[in-house]
Structure formats: C-alpha cells, structure tokens
Amino acid sequence: MYQIIIIGAGPAGLTSALYALRANKKVLLLEAKAYGGQILTANSVENYPGIEKISGVDFADQLYHQVEKLGVEIKYETVLRVESDKTVITNNGKYQADAIIIATGASNRKLNIEREQEFVGKGVSYCASCDGTFYKNKIVAVNGGGNTALDDALYLSGIAAKVYLVHRREEFRGENKTLEELKKKENVEFILNANIVSLNGKDHLESITLKDQSENTREISVDGLFIAIGQEPKNEIFSNVVDLDDKGYILSEDGVHTKTEGIYVAGDTRVKLLRQLTTAVSDGSIAATVAIREMAKN
C-alpha cells in the first residue's frame, strides 16, 4: 500500500515525486522504459527559466538523482490498467494507493507508411540528438513543421552535408527565430506542401518519395530520415477512469483532476495549450500538491 503512485517518470512524474517525497509521503514511481521521457531527445534545452543551456539527458539525470536522494521507490514495469479504487495492475504485480497521478506523457507520432518500422535504425529515426552523429557528412531529411522539426534540422545542419526539411504545409508552426536561423544555412533546403509517401531501399533507407498538392511525385536520395511530426498519448488503458478527447489526451477541467476521485493527471498526457518542459514540471508540482492536500482531508 502506497500513499501516492505516480505513473510515468518524465519531468512531470519526477516533479510529482519530488513534491510528494518532500511532504514525507510513501511514493511508488512506475515507468515502462527509462526515466526522463521525451526530454531525453532534446540536444539542448535553452528555454527553461534559470538554466541558460542544458542537454535533455543532463536535465533528466539531475532531476532523477534529486528524487533518488529523497528515497523514491521506482519500478520499471508496464501499467496494464487502473481501477477506480486506485489499484494499479502492471505486467509484474498489483499495487494500491490513496492517490494516483497519471504522467505518462506522449510518444512520437509515426508516418504510418509502408516499411517505416522496417527502416527504424536503418535510416529512419525519431530522435536527431540520439542518432544524428551517425549521419556525419551524409544526406538527411527532416519531416515536420513544429519546433521539434526545426530544432532537429538546425542541429543536423551542423553534422550532415545536406538537410532537406519536408513539410506538408506552406507555413511552419515552430518558432520564427529558429526558422530564420535555418534559412541562413547553405546546406538546408526547404521542401514545402509535400508529403512523404514511400520509403525506398534494400537493407537500409536509400531514398524517399514525395507527393505535392498537385499529385506530382519526386524522389530524393537520403541516407537518413528524421520524423518529427508531433506526439500522441497512449491513454486507452485509463479510459475507464478518465475522459479522453478525440486525440486521446486526458480531459481535465482544471488541469489536474480527472473524473475519478483520487486520480490526477500531469504533463503532456493531458489536454493543454502548451507541451513544454516548463509546463510539465508545473503540472507535476500542482498535481502532487493537490493530491497531498485532498488526502489530508479524507
């Protein structure tokens, strides 16, 4: 029996654990893969107040060790479902708590085209900072139009010989400052109003086929493709205890409570305006604080 179970060890979950442990609560942190979440893919974090520049890996490490020193209990298990009586069933056991905080974040969205999975690790990647060094002086493409795609293209422009930035629209959603930096790069070429329709090659990715709005196709040779088209949550397992929107994000009127008493939400897994590191840690601190206060009333 635990006082608080936190599902997910990204920035939101780790911050929830930090606040709960500092309140002297018995906390179980459940994580399916590795602590840190999506921030691990960030080569450089430069928009976190008070920290001029830090890598995503270093940020995650520092936050985890801060929580570890407070005595967090962490189990690397996959959550299968959550019951309304605040029982959590995993692939390895069953745990119960007075409160549960869901902080499972979101995962990289796939193109969902033929051979995509086949080429993962063989030319297809979802993490430029993880795999970019493998493409030194080679030709790569980045697919997407948000901040992640722009950041990836900028990062890769310092490694690869050529970077194609492919976007299905005319306008980008990412920060204009990054876009302007990219426009100054001689080895970056923009391909707009185009979708990637096929991945080509034998054992490794060799080229991608693009289709424009007029249905014209074009094939370009690349050694690597970095897919940065956003994220999606995996909240179906919680649908019995929370409400989801049409994209699968958890609905919460106040950003912390769900439809089930004692079950809270934090971070990128919920409906929100901005999914950034700053809002993730804010969510985590609020969720833990609210859970602690409401536990004290019961």
Image: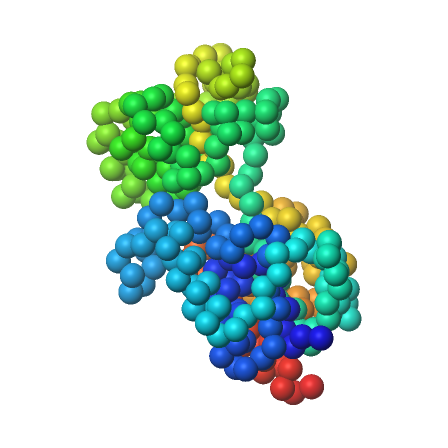
Q: Position of residue 21 (x, y in %)?
A: 52, 76
Front residue (pair 86, 113) = 86
Front residue (pair 276, 70) = 70
64 up-or-down from 219: above or below: below
117 with respect to 88 (left or right): left
227 with respect to 32 (left or right): left
Question: Quadrant of residue 164 in the image?
Answer: top left
Of the 4 image quadrants, the one containing the N terminus is bottom right
291 up-or-down from 258: above or below: below
24 up-or-down from 123: above or below: below
127 with respect to 251 (left or right): left
Q: Position of residue 38 (x, y in %)?
A: 48, 49
Q: Position of residue 295 (x, y in %)?
A: 64, 82
Count of marks, rendered view:
0
User: According to the image, what is the colour scheme of the structure?
Assistant: rainbow
Q: Position of residue 193 (x, y in %)?
A: 44, 25
Question: Quadrant of residue 140 in the image?
Answer: top left
Instruction: Name the residue: 50% across, 64% down.
Output: 14
Instruction: Name the residue: 33% across, 48% down.
Output: 44
The answer to whether residue 89 of the structure is visible from this angle is: yes
Instruction: Name the residue: 54% across, 52% down.
Output: 34
The answer to whether residue 213 of the structure is visible from this angle is: no
Instruction: Name the residue: 48% across, 74% down.
Output: 70
Of the 4 image quadrants, the one containing the C terminus is bottom right
70 with respect to 180 (left or right): right
